[in-house]
Amino acid sequence: MTTFSVKQMRLLTMYKGSLVTMEAQSALSFQRSGAPRQFSNHGAASARSSTLEDIYPKFTNPQPSFTSGAVGHIFSSSSGMSSDFHYSSVISHSNISEKAPFVSQSSGILQSTSSQYMKETNNSSWCTDSLPDFFDYPQNAPIQSSNLEHSIMPSEDLLDYPQNTVIQSSSLEHSILPSEDFGKQSDWQEWTDQLINEGDALTPDWNDILIDTNIVDPEPKMAYHVGGSSTNSMQAQPLISQSSGEACLPLTATPCASGSQSKPRMRWTPELHEAFVEAVNKLGGSEKATPKGVLKQMKVEGLTIYHVKSHLQKYRTARYRPEPSLEGPLEKKTSVEDLSSLELKTGLEITEALRLQMEVQKRLHEQLEIQRNLQLRIEEQGRYLQMMFEKQCNSGTDKLTAPSSTELPSLQANPNEPGPDPVVGPFDEGTSKSGPDVSQPAKRAKVNK
Amino acid sequence: MKFGKRLKQHVEETLPGWRDMYLNYKDLKKLVRLISSSLEYGKSEAEFVYLLNNEIDKFNMFFMEQEEDFIIRHKELQQRIKRVNESEPSSQEEYEEEMSRIRKDIVDFHGEMVLLVNYSNINYTGMAKILKKYDKRTGGLLRLAFIQKVLEQPFFTTELVSKLVKECETTIDELFPTAMVAVELKDATITMVGEGIFRNTVAALMTMKEIRNGSSTQSHFSLPALSLPDTELIRSFQLNSPIPSI
């Protein structure tokens, strides 16, 4: 094992600590969940988990390997570096000890297991979720094989973002072939089949959901979010309709027990809040209304009393202390003083100052939106390039020229217009448009606003 | 360490309750250095990813919490305006007073929401950078795939908050009586710039510009430099403000 300096050890222990906390909690959850599949694989995994034992000593006892935070990936031996076939899951962690952990409910993709989980979720405390990750490993065989073994975490692995679901199912399929190391292939097959079947059915909905439309949905929507976790349909599914994407992202996550009382972290929407307010008003106002009553009145599936309770609390605070800002004590003093000094200034001056403030803020927001769009495009392009690169690799050496007209979300165009530009792939020679690397700096000048 | 410095500065200047919610860029950078010298690659990557995921959770939690608050406050402000306009005011003066309070509140509210979007963006930028560093140092290929996941996270999907911001702007336009006259830097303005939200938004804007000022490792994954027409004006806010901003 590498020798680390004191400082380095400190850093290591820092997250080792949080890792251990998380495992202890997840250990409980696994005992509770009773999902047989999870245990079926760990046997194989733990037998071979030699490398990780040094750092994750807790795993020497029968605990599912998923909690090791290990990055598992299924490496397809057929291709050199195909991210398509990579599949890894990392379990996350949240600072459970300090904050309300993320509670998550299992993915609706796995209908059979999810119902199991669901029964237990309502009153139990779950925490965080696994974060299935996709990444490529370099050609480092020994490590890969050990990681392969640790990648057997069916329930977590399969809980993934909607649009990745389909990819996942295919990657799982492919992954089963080269990996004879897997103890229980039959389990994998089952999971995969499920995934494929569910995935197709669910993806279209998710595609709608994830499109950023501004269609206001009159019905209250339920949106769960668990940090870093993928999304799930569950009972939230029926309520999810074509509306603003972010509001409807379903939830998912890996069941993971936590010591403290945890409630599922939900993402509120204005529509949901409207329904909430209506319910509260029907019950006689924010003071009179009880969480239970509101919950009943709202009739939103998947909404728990914890959600309502905390929301009600916030609501009451907002009503009786209008505009509580996040100012600290120092700032509060300033604003009190300024209030009196402001009164001395003319109304016009104040208004003008406010206008100026608005201008700055609007400007900031505008720039943020632009920046965000650029960032999205950059990644989209990167993804595209990666895909092209892999296609080149896979299609063999006789095909050196990339397809002549392909749609590429080009950064060279106006960032606000997603117009497809026929851009040639990286291997093409002698074309009018140069490759992305070369042209970007020059063309970027146009992009600047 | 340009971004790191900028981030640190930003965090110091930011709203108090937010200071702990930003990316631990410095620590992650240290870890990347650690990992690049470590021999046990697979383990290290797992640990690194684990930490990153922790950060993501932190962002998500904070972001969603704030978002929920914004939804509530947004509605409340609208109610408040409605109430003031509909109820019979005792006197014109009181009406004016309340309106002026509302105006201030709503402008600050707008600013706070924008600051949350800024929060989201800065953390995303930091993540992208640290991933890039990781790949560079370890020769790994973590970045591309991981960032895809980050893009989908609640904290980065800021559409709702942006929508609220725009709605706020509409409301504000209705509240502010006359068209905007020539903006001069009067004393009132300068004092106000020194206060809370306004100071933060000005600072955020300047920080953004500086973060994006051409880096040494510009690639097709980098953002172009930010050009603001009234950079000088905005910068002068900072210089003139009574509260020194470093």
Image (cartoon, coloured by chain):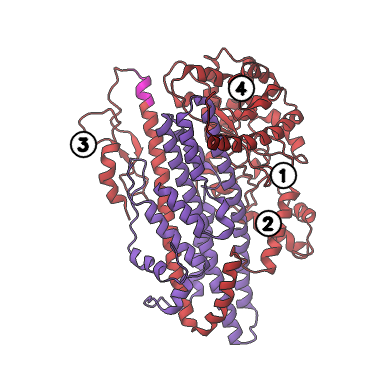
Chain colours: A red, B purple
Earlier-in-chain disc, 1 versus 2? 1
Question: Disc 1 residue type?
Answer: Ser
Earlier-in-chain disc, 4 versus 1? 4
Q: Main secondary structure of the magenta part?
A: helix
Earlier-in-chain disc, 2 versus 4? 4
Q: Is residue B26 visible?
A: yes
Question: Disc 3 residue type?
Answer: Ser
Q: Is residue B173 magenta?
A: no
Picture layout, residue A195 above or below residue B167: above
Earlier-in-chain disc, 2 versus 3? 2
Earlier-in-chain disc, 3 versus 4? 4
Earlier-in-chain disc, 1 versus 3? 1
Q: Could you tell me residue A405's position as x and y percent?
A: 30, 33
Alpha-carbon distance for marks 2 and 4?
43 Å
Is the Cβ of the residue at disc 2 closer than 8 Å to that at disc 3?
Answer: no
Q: Is residue A391 magenta?
A: yes
Label 1: few (<14), some or many (≥20) within 10 Å? many
Question: Disc 3 marks which residue?
Answer: A432
Alpha-carbon distance for marks 4 and 1?
27 Å
- Disc number for residue A152: 4
Q: Which residues are magenta?
A: A390-396
Is the Cβ of the residue at disc 4 closer than 8 Å to that at disc 1?
Answer: no
Question: Disc 2 marks which residue?
Answer: A275
Question: Disc 4 residue type?
Answer: Ile
Question: Disc 2 residue type?
Answer: Ala
Task: Between residue A233 and residue A440, name the one nearer to us.
Answer: A440
Alpha-carbon distance for marks 1 and 2?
24 Å
